[in-house]
Amino acid sequence: MSERLIRLVRIIVAIQASPGITAKELAEKCETTDRTIYRDLDLLSAAHIPITNEGYGKGYNYLGNFSIYPLDWTDEEAVAFGMLPQILDQLSHLIPPDFYTAYEKVMATHHKEKKDLHNILQQMVSIIQMGTPAFQEQQNNFLSPVIQAIIHSRTLEVVYHTQSRNVTTSRTLDPYYLIPRDHRFYLIAYCHEKEKFLTFRMSRFLEVKQTEQTFKKQDFNIKEYFKHTWSIIQGTEKIHFKVLFHKNIARYVKEEELFVKPKLTEKEDGSLLFEVTLNHDREFLQWIMQYGSDAEILEPVEYRKKMKQTLLNWLETYQNEKL
């Protein structure tokens, strides 16, 4: 199926590049038979691609202004195409002048696409407002180079501060995803030094440099990566929580936009039983605490005790009058 899909795309591009191309020529380009090409053309027509035959021996063309745009070249394709004039210099006496004007138009289109994309990225970054960490006077905004690196599969060289260990390191990263969590941005990237995928908080980047090195994306499933993760912090445990929400807030809990899929059971009195399995507890407990006494941890029992101790500590803090 994938081979046929690739062939269909090649047919669409070939007709646009060479209006009047025949079925035989298409078959040669696609390394298949005339009969297969006819079947593919019928399939494309059924998919409302406006292909028309100009008559016997005149080949295929498009009706109206149909075209494949933009070029959407890879960097490698652009470099390869850009080498054409040098390669053809020795044959310049055989090449009509119109080739070079056509070449210039194609390259101009490519450069305009790159400029338009850059402008769109800059506009997008300018409307994304990021907070500033309390310890920093100014936030380093590396969104633009990171987004461009993700789009073009460019490796990054970065300087990163790991807050938990209070160390600053230089790293080489292949960036995959930029995701928002709790009013912050995080980068999911393959770390060359650690040889595995890691999560990096954007505000902890001190330097970000896009290299000329490209990378081929691995088979990476971000849903599997964050499986059983409440927000960002990942652990190795499997903790099954059962929480009972009071009927007064049950409807609001059901509206929460979560990164995991909980099991929800509505009780006769209107309360809501919330069950979820997680690999770390901290972020989930922080979320539970915002609901105060309207949220009761039922299981695991040790977390009931842990929450009780937390509340006793709070009470002790506020019973100690300092005013």
Image (spheres, rainbow, N blue to C red):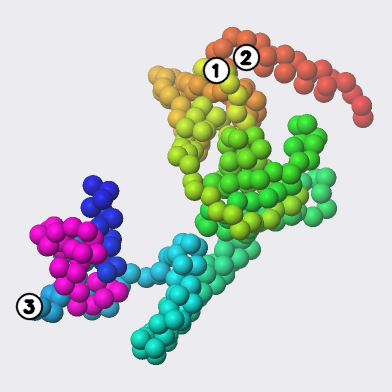
Q: Label 2 to label 1, Cα distance in Å?
A: 10 Å
Between discs 2 and 3, the one toward the N terminus:
3
Give the main secondary structure, helix, strand or loop, of the magenta stretch: helix
Residue 300 appears anywhere in the view: yes
Task: State the count of labels.
Answer: 3
- Please state the extent of the stretch shown in magenta in the rendering: 15-41
Q: Residue at x 39, y 88 (%)?
A: 93
Tell me where residue 6 appears, x and y as whole percent.
Answer: 28, 55
Residue drawn at the location 46% of the way across and 67% of the way down: 80
Please give the name of the residue rendered at 48% of the width and 42% of the height, measured from the top-left corner: 218
In the picture of the structure, the residue carrying the numbered disc 1 is 239
Q: Which residue appears farthest toward the right when viewing the image?
A: 323
Q: Which residue is mark 3?
A: 56
Across and down, in percent, residue 75 comes to 50, 63
| Label 3 crowd (10 A; few <14 / some 14-19 / many >=20) | few
Q: Are marks 3 and 1 in contact (CB under 8 Å)?
A: no
216 vs 122, nearest the viewer = 216
Q: Amino acid at mark 2?
A: Tyr
